[in-house]
Amino acid sequence: MRIGLSYDLREGMPLQQNSPEDALEEYDSLETVEIIALALEAKGHSVIKLGGGMQFLDNVRQNKVDIVFNIAEGRGNCRSREAQVPSILEMLDIPYTGSDPLCLAVCLDKATTKKLVAADSIITPQWLVIASKEELERTSWDGFPFPAIIKPAYEGSSKGIRLSSLIYSVQQARQEAGKILGYYRQPVMIEKFIAGDEVTVGVIGNTPPKVVGMMRVVPKKKEECFIYSLEVKRDYLSLVDYRCPADLGQDVLDMLADASLRVYKVLGCRDFARLDFRVSPEGMPYFIEMNPLPGLGTYSDLVIMALKLGWTHTELIVAVLDAALERYPQCVSV
């Protein structure tokens, strides 16, 4: 098959004036693009690098492809940016890997995601969203639980989640919310902090999807309130241990698996995804976020999880493609 590869590279990505320091955090490296291309070529496919943005628009119209392997994060800071490339591919009637535009747009909006999963009786921490500095001034904090985590409402890759994001008071909340509103130009989410284990779950497939692994993220230095922040992710080899399979009780693992598959279905995910949970000291999983376009670089949690479970990097990439091909039988005969 001729497989197009859509992506957005950090290299050469224009930065707007006064952009936050982590503005390009979710974009991929050339190394990740090469790893995916080589994995697909190793299975006998030819790969056409389509890039992202305007380059993608030109290339996808000039090159005939049978399917697109999509890892493009989209441009700008709007909540629908991850839906940009899939929307174009649907308009052109080109098959592609991963979730559709609606799912991608919904999942990048943390509050909308939580509303949908909560409506299906999946437990998620109490939250509050503040859309502007004017709204911040008139927000009532009566009864809101502290400590809490504060973060941009439309970001991934832990953008805007720093060590200072754990807040203990209304004064801290106002201060940090003001910074996020200014730096990221989008609403702020404040979410009750759940003490306990950070666990991420990988899911692959469609009919039916399967939990392929659960990974516990454990700080190497014991901390009362561990946050899997951007600082930690940037120095993960020194700061955390990844335990996969997750060393949790079977009851907890069963609840995590059940919740993950329910969330995957509720949000309409396809082919692959990664979900984040916090497990309370009492053993109750709380859904935090869904990532329907998880990273596939060597430093990405889904890849780390797969390697610890005995997969190769290539096998993971091919599994994503195979899941998509099950939805497009016309491509298999090409």
Image (cartoon, grey):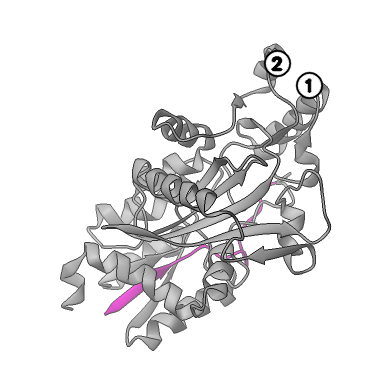
Give the residue type at disc 1. Val
User: From the viewer's perspective, is 125 left or right of 166?
Assistant: left
| x and y, in percent, of residue 9 in the image | 56, 65
Q: Mark yes or no: residue 159 visible.
A: no
- Magenta segment: does it hold 156? no
**Residue at point 60%, 53% (across, down):** 199
Where does the magenta region start and end? Answer: 1-17
User: From the viewer's perspective, is 141 left or right of 202?
Assistant: right
Badge 2: few (under 14), some or many (20 or more) residues near its Cα, within 10 Å? few
Whether residue 105 is situated above or below residue 303 in the rendered picture: above
The residue under label 1 is 170
Q: Mark yes or no: residue 235 visible.
A: yes
Whether residue 31 is situated above or below residue 170 in the rendered picture: below
User: From the viewer's perspective, is 196 left or right of 223?
Assistant: left
Query: Which quarter shows the N terminus?
Result: bottom left
Mark 2 or mark 1, earlier in chain = 2
Magenta stretch, overall SS: loop
| x and y, in percent, of residue 99 in the image | 36, 53
**Residue at point 48%, 78% (across, down):** 311
How far is mark 2 from mark 1, CA to CA? 7 Å
Q: Which mark is residue 70?
A: none
Give the residue type at disc 2. Trp
Instruction: Please name whichever residue, 224 or 228, is drawn nearer the observer in this view of the structure.
Output: 224
Q: Which mark is residue 141?
A: 2
**Residue at point 38%, 77% (across, down):** 48
Whether residue 101 is situated above or below residue 247 in the rendered picture: above
User: In what element is the residue under mark 2?
Assistant: loop
